[in-house]
Amino acid sequence: MYITERNKKYNAYVEAKMPKTKPWPSLFRAFWVGGLICCLGELIKDLCLYFFPYMTIADAYAWALIILILLASFLTGVGIFDKIGAYAGAGTIVPITGFSNSIASPALEFKREGLVFGLMSKMFVIAGPVIVTGVVSSIVVGLIYLIFNL
Amino acid sequence: MFDPLMYVKVFAIGGLVCLIGQLLIITTKMTSARILVTFLLFGVVLEALKLFEPIREFAGAGISVPIIGFGASLAHGAISAGETMGLLGVLTGGLTATAGGIAVAIFAGYIFGLIFNSKTK
């Protein structure tokens, strides 16, 4: 009773203190940065197919993702990704760059807590839930297809 | 290849997906981990309903670069390996299909984590 009352007050306090971001500009920023990252992926795919004509389209898309992941990790390392992320919000989180950043960023942040319990384990603070969700749900879907022979 | 119209579609759909993500952040105050999980699940569902492939043919990287594409290839791997290998395929297919992305993200995160130091704010 007391705790819910206190939490409500605290939330109201946080609400009042939080910097107000106007929704429309942030939506627009997420749109154009996100769109641009996807175009970069499409460009890498096209370049792969241009230089390696025998590559399959699926492989070319896989390379596009791998290069975007590498790029996002590197930009996280040099500290540029955080600046782009602060500007674009979901524009950098929703593409695969967000997954890559969610691994590289805690790796950097928790390095000082040691190599094993810092860097290596904290890497999966966000990526862990993502991988768990993905594996569990894909197995469920696969089982449904297997059982009902769709 | 290098079709300008395709790039317009990629930009529009990819941007729209990110805009929906930003809308979720604003309206529900979701953290980035929840956003990633939500979009991943959405991708799995799209693939399960066989809707992902037609969207990808239309929008290319606009739908496969967002984490939706990651979820879809997990589900696609489990479904297609299940058809050829049965139960074992269902268990191994998802991670096999996405192993490249996960491995590179871990490898790059580790290497760059060692090389660079976090910027103190």
Image (spheres, coloured by chain):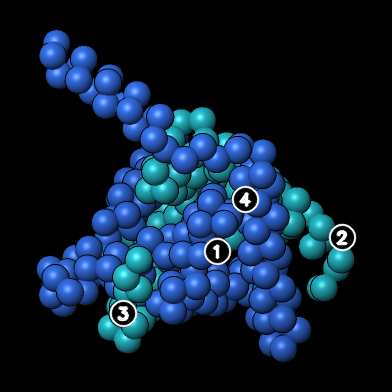
Q: Are marks 1 and 3 in contact (CB under 8 Å)?
A: no
User: Image check: B48 left or right of A113?
Assistant: right
User: Going 60% across and 38% down the picture, which residue do you hit?
Assistant: A22
User: Image check: B10 left or right of A22?
Assistant: right
**Can you tell which chain is drawn cyan?**
B
Mark seen at residue A30: 4
Q: Nearer the viewer, residue A138 or A113?
A: A113
Q: Are marks 3 and 2 on the same chain?
A: yes
The residue tagged 3 is: B117
The residue tagged 1 is: A84
**Vertical comparison of B24 with A115: above or below:** above
Cα separation between marks 4 and 3: 28 Å
Quarter the C terminus of chain B occupies: bottom left
Please tell me whether mark 3 sits on a helix, a strand or a loop.
loop
Q: Nearer the viewer, residue A30 or B94?
A: A30
Q: Point out the tag, 1 or 4, that comes first from the N-terminus.
A: 4
Provide the chain ID for the residue under circle 1: A
Provide the chain ID for the residue under circle 4: A
- Image quadrant in which you'd find residue A120: bottom left
Please tell me whether mark 2 sits on a helix, a strand or a loop.
helix
| Residue mark closest to the camera, 2 vs 4 | 4
Q: Are marks 2 and 4 on the same chain?
A: no
Residue B74 x, y percent position in the rendering: 45, 55
Q: Are marks 1 and 4 on the same chain?
A: yes
Q: Point out the tag, 3 or 2, that comes first from the N-terminus.
A: 2
Please tell me whether mark 1 sits on a helix, a strand or a loop.
helix
**Can you tell which chain is drawn blue?**
A
Cα separation between marks 2 and 4: 21 Å
